[in-house]
């Protein structure tokens, strides 16, 4: 059994308990704190990726969104910088999606 499956199973147990009316201040506070910590971590990651993306954008005078679309279409070549920029942009987008899950709205 993987750690992920184990964690999901544990969360499922808590969900079942809560759906049946069980409530615990300790669990509520713990979950709130865990979510806050994960959100803060994602926000820090996003700032780091923003800095890295801005450096590429300034160097190549192109927005990351435009670069990524053109790179995916094979229009820009295959320099090491472009592969790194593409990877940073993809990781940035992953963090944005994670933060959207925390906030419930599009960033």
Image: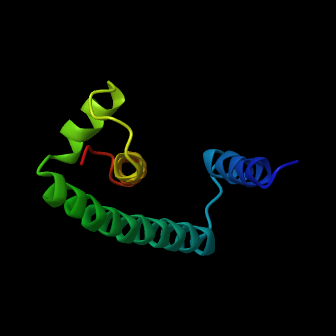
The colour scheme is rainbow
Looking at the image, how many numbered discs can be counted on the residues?
0
* Towards the viewer: 89 or 83: 83
Give residue 34's quadrant in the image. bottom right
- Residue at image location 14% in from the left, 46% down from the top: 62
Give residue 68's quadrant in the image. top left
User: Residue 32, percent across and down?
Assistant: 49, 68
Q: Residue furthest left?
A: 61
Q: Left or right? Give the position of 72 relative to 67.
A: right
* Towards the viewer: 89 or 106: 89
Q: Left or right? Give the position of 84 relative to 7.
A: left
Residue 4 in view: yes
Q: Residue furthest right?
A: 1
Residue 29 drawn above or below residue 63: below
Residue 42 drawn above or below residue 71: below
User: Residue 59, percent across and down?
Assistant: 17, 59
- Residue at image location 22% in from the left, 64% down from the top: 55
User: Residue 99, percent across and down?
Assistant: 37, 54
- Residue at image location 34% in from the left, 46% down from the top: 82
* Towards the viewer: 46 or 25: 46
- Residue at image location 61% in from the left, 75% down from the top: 26
Residue 98 in view: no
* Towards the viewer: 34 or 70: 70
User: Residue 42, percent across and down?
Assistant: 41, 64
């Amino acid at each position: 059994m993987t750690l992920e499956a184990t964690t999901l199973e544990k969360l499922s147990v808590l969900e079942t308990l809560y759906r049946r009316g069980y409530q615990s201040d300790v669990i509520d506070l713990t979950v709130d704190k865990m979510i806050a910590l994960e959100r803060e971590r994602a926000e820090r990651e996003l700032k780091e990726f923003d800095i890295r993306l801005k450096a590429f954008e300034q160097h190549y005078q192109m927005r990351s969104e435009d670069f990524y679309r053109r790179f995916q279409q094979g229009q820009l070549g295959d320099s090491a910088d472009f592969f790194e920029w593409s990877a940073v942009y993809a990781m940035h987008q992953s963090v944005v999606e994670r933060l959207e899950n925390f906030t419930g709205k599009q960033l």
